[in-house]
Amino acid sequence: MNPTIRRLSTLGLALALPFAASAADYKVGPGSTLGFSGKFQGQQFDGSFGKFDAAISYDPANLAASKFDVNVDVATAKTGDNDRDGALPGSDFFDASKFPKAHYVTTGFSKDAKGNVVANGNLTLHGVTKPVALKVAFSPNAGGARLSVTGTVNRLDFGVGSGDYKDTTTIANEVLVNGSLNLLPK
Amino acid sequence: MPLRSDHARWSPVAKTFHWTMALLILGNGAFAFWMDGLKPSLHKINMFALHKSIGLTVLALFLLRVLWRTIDRRPHDEPAPAWQKVAAHTVHGFLYLLIVAIPLTGWAYNSAHGYPLQYFKQFNLPALLEKNEALSNALGAVHEYLFWFLLIVLVAHVGGALKHHFVDRDDTLRRMLPFGRAKRNTPTLPGDAP
């Protein structure tokens, strides 16, 4: 490499660095939902968390600098069935008095075979931390952006459902997670 | 042994329908009172699912039984006063009605409550009604009262059979017993070759 090119590439790197270090920061706006779908006795049920918060830094052109950090109040889960909603925060499931929050934070982003962006991160739920990948769809709009994520969580990996409730022939292990966030500039 | 009943005896198919359903209906009724007293748990949920599956089995057997009836023959009524014959057939009518109504109100109760309905963990059946809590409570009560009504009708059904057996000493009960054999003490009607 000749000295001129070396000097120029150093300059290029120096110019690029400030951009690499930042992606747009967003906060969660109204109309955002964080939901999940499970299966009970062979039938799907849908639920959502009433209270959650997320700090989103995202730039589709600069995934290295992007980050999701999400906190969820697990006691606010509602599925449209009084019995189930009464049981979910209890010690057999989320044990919300002991573990009030679930936390998801990304460790990096990648692309799958179809070119979809995948967020790789760690989910802490019910006191257990395990990697969880989420498929990401991001579309900027006039006011900010729409961010949709979908993924799968195996409830038993996190000890959600203890004792008898481990029975996956009645309550499926797989739970689909879906988030649809209305992002506003921070 | 012929599959169809004749003028004097019930066939093994008719007997199998009769006794299998009797056992399932009474067993499922007793089971229901036991499971109702369980503490809330997944075990209780699974026991309720079993009760529902047995009830659906009764409903399915009933449909098959009615289909079978259309190709089967029936033994003649044993001699009895006309009013007793009418009473016996009315009781049968009520039993048939209740055998359908009890599972169906249970199914509707389950639907109105918003529960899934899974047959022995194999496949799901659709809801009969939209979710409706008030209606669900009413249907639950009707489901149970109909079972009490069934027991009352059953007293007449069993009482009649026992009266024929011990008082009239005829074949009414014997020809329906699993291994019972008709005494053939009724005169063969003209044109009814054995």
Image: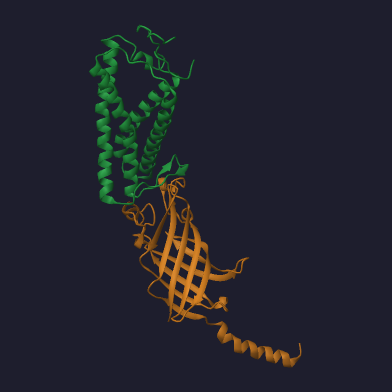
Pick whichever, B17 or B49, lies toward us: B17
How has the structure been colored for display? by chain
| Residue occupying the far front of the picture | B191
Identity of the residue drawn at 46% across and 50% down: A172
Which color has been applied to chain B in this rendered view?
A: green
Identity of the residue drawn at 55% across and 71% down: A108
Q: Position of residue B154 (x, y in %)?
A: 28, 25
Pick whichever, B130 or B188, lies toward us: B188
Query: Which of the 4 quarters of the picture holds residue A182?
Result: bottom left
Q: Quadrant of the C terminus of chain B?
A: top left
| Residue occupying the far right of the picture | A2
| Residue occupying the far bottom of the picture | A4
Q: Position of residue B121 (x, y in %)?
A: 45, 42
Q: Is residue B40 something one can see in this rendering?
A: no
Chain painted in orange in the figure: A
Q: How many marks?
A: 0
Pick whichever, B31 or B192, lies toward us: B192
Query: Which of the 4 quarters of the picture holds residue A95?
Result: bottom left
Q: Is residue B164 something one can see in this rendering?
A: yes
On screen, A33 above or below A22? above
In the picture, measured across the screen, residue A115 lies left or right of residue A56, that is right
Q: Position of residue A82 (x, y in %)?
A: 31, 54
In the picture, measured across the screen, residue A17 lies left or right of residue A67, that is right
On screen, B159 above or below B39? above
On screen, B154 above or below B108? above
Q: Position of residue A84 (x, y in %)?
A: 35, 53
